[in-house]
Image (tube, rainbow, N blue to C red):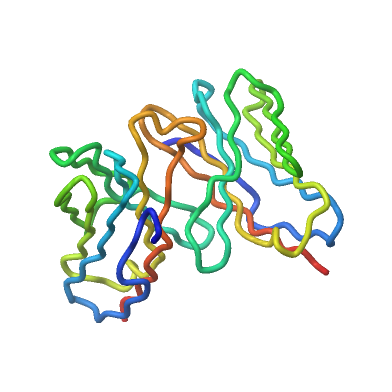
Amino acid sequence: GEDVEQSLFLSVREGDSSVINCTYTDSSSTYLYWYKQEPGAGLQLLTYIFSNMDMKQDQRLTVLLNKKDKHLSLRIADTDTGDSAIYFCAETYGNQFYFGTGTSLTVIP
Amino acid sequence: DADVTQTPRNRITKTGKRIMLECSQTKGHDRMYWYRQDPGLGLRLIYYSFDVKDINKGEISDGYSVSRQAQAKFSLSLESAIPNQTALYFCATSDASARGDYGYTFGSGTRLTVV
């Protein structure tokens, strides 16, 4: 399978920006995704980016894609306690998704 | 009702027992998947099915089997459960494109503990 890597933990203060990073291996991925998993729940699609884009903004979320370095990031502006969750990046390769290990974001009030 | 429903939500079972986890969906998607989630390991694909006659092994299929009873139903069985199968199991669905806005739709998960 493909390797999709993330840091396991991130803590930020409420009101600050959070930046969650991801590296992937397959340069031919056409879409890259961010999913959010709240405690006791399944994964929900947060946002995605097509591989020919460098940036996508959706309200408080900004996705940056550096294809040369195979690096994807998710920036959450004005983080609040409701953003505390595990965030997974994923890439599509062939007909399958490959998920990262997940980054557990803790927002400190 | 949820688009993807998993039953049971929680289960504790003994080593050596057979157990079935069930998944049903109302999305009308052809493709269904079973993943397990372990802390620090992310999601790993167990089995997937692109239609009712199609079953494929994923990354970690040993010790598991599946049955695609209908387009809407995909069950995962552990024939003889062992403690290292203790994990959170997710069912997911997608349409044929599984791209962009479509992505995957996940169930809420089944927490399985094997003692």
Question: Going by the image, does B19 lie left or right of B86?
Answer: left
Observer-nearest of B44 and A106: A106
Q: Residue at x 22, y 40 (%)?
A: B56
Q: Residue at x 66, y 32 (%)?
A: A71
Is B58 drawn above or below residue B84 in the view shown?
A: above
Q: Residue furthest top?
A: A52
Q: Position of residue B52 (x, y in %)?
A: 16, 41
Q: Position of residue A44 (x, y in %)?
A: 53, 51
Observer-nearest of A55 and B85: A55
Question: Going by the image, does A6 lie left or right of B32?
Answer: right
Observer-nearest of B103 and A102: B103
Q: Position of residue A41 (x, y in %)?
A: 50, 63
Question: Going by the image, does A17 lie left or right of B89?
Answer: right
Which quarter of the image is occupied by the C terminus of chain A? bottom right
Q: Residue at x 70, y 62 (%)?
A: A82
Is B47 drawn above or below residue B101 in the view shown?
A: below
Q: Position of residue B11 (x, y in %)?
A: 32, 77
Question: Going by the image, does B23 lie left or right of A109?
Answer: left
Label tally: 0
Which quarter of the image is occupied by the N terminus of chain A? top left
Is B24 drawn above or below residue A97 in the view shown?
A: below
